[in-house]
Image (tube, rainbow, N blue to C red):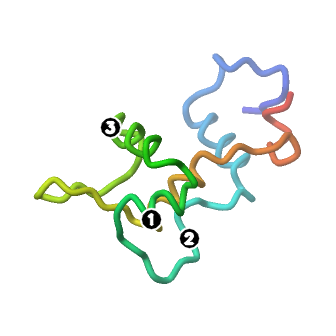
Amino acid sequence: MSIDKNTRLIDLTVTDLMVVIKDCMTGFIPVDPIVIEDDEIGGYEIAETVTGYSRQTLYQLKSAGKLPHIALPGGGIRFSKKTLINWLLSHQKFTNQEIPGFWRL
């Protein structure tokens, strides 16, 4: 199927959509491969340093289930520096120049 700016979304198949998304996403830096050799595990101090959030904000995000953390069997909480950096990068917003032309039609 030939897809152009006049193609209706409802006319696309799932396969067509997957091809379009894959084509548009080439060139973006993947989030998972992060260049940190040693991971650091620690308490809220690490989370504060990595995210820049206050402890109160970190408590709220963790309680809401929005902040990745490690729950210890005894009730303690630990954070992985690598995981927090990947979490932050997953919320990255792109500029208009970084967005592929297809999405700006």
Type of amino acid at the residue the image marks with label 3? Ser
Left/right of residue 74 with respect to residue 78 in the rendered view = left
- At 82% from the left and 48% from the top, the residue drawn is 98
Q: Quadrant of the N terminus?
A: top right
> How many angstroms separate mark 1 from mark 3 (CA)?
17 Å
Q: For mark 1, give the secondary structure.
A: helix
Q: Is residue 76 above or below residue 21?
A: below
First-in-chain label (1 vs 3): 1
- At 71% from the left and 57% from the top, the residue drawn is 28
Report which residue position mark 2 lands on: 34
Is label 1 in contact with label 2 (beta carbons under 8 Å)? Answer: no
Mark 1 vs mark 2, foreground winner is 1
Q: Which mark is residue 46?
A: 1
Q: Is residue 78 above or below residue 18?
A: below
Q: For mark 3, give the secondary structure.
A: helix
Type of amino acid at the residue the image marks with label 1? Ile
First-in-chain label (2 vs 3): 2
Where residue 2 sits: x, y (%)?
78, 33
Mark 2 vs mark 3, foreground winner is 3
First-in-chain label (1 vs 2): 2
Report which residue position mark 3 lands on: 63
Where residue 30 sits: x, y (%)?
61, 60
The answer to which of 23 and 77 lies nearer the viewer is 77
> How many angstroms separate mark 2 from mark 3 (CA)?
26 Å
Where residue 12 sits: x, y (%)?
64, 25
Where residue 55 sits: x, y (%)?
44, 48
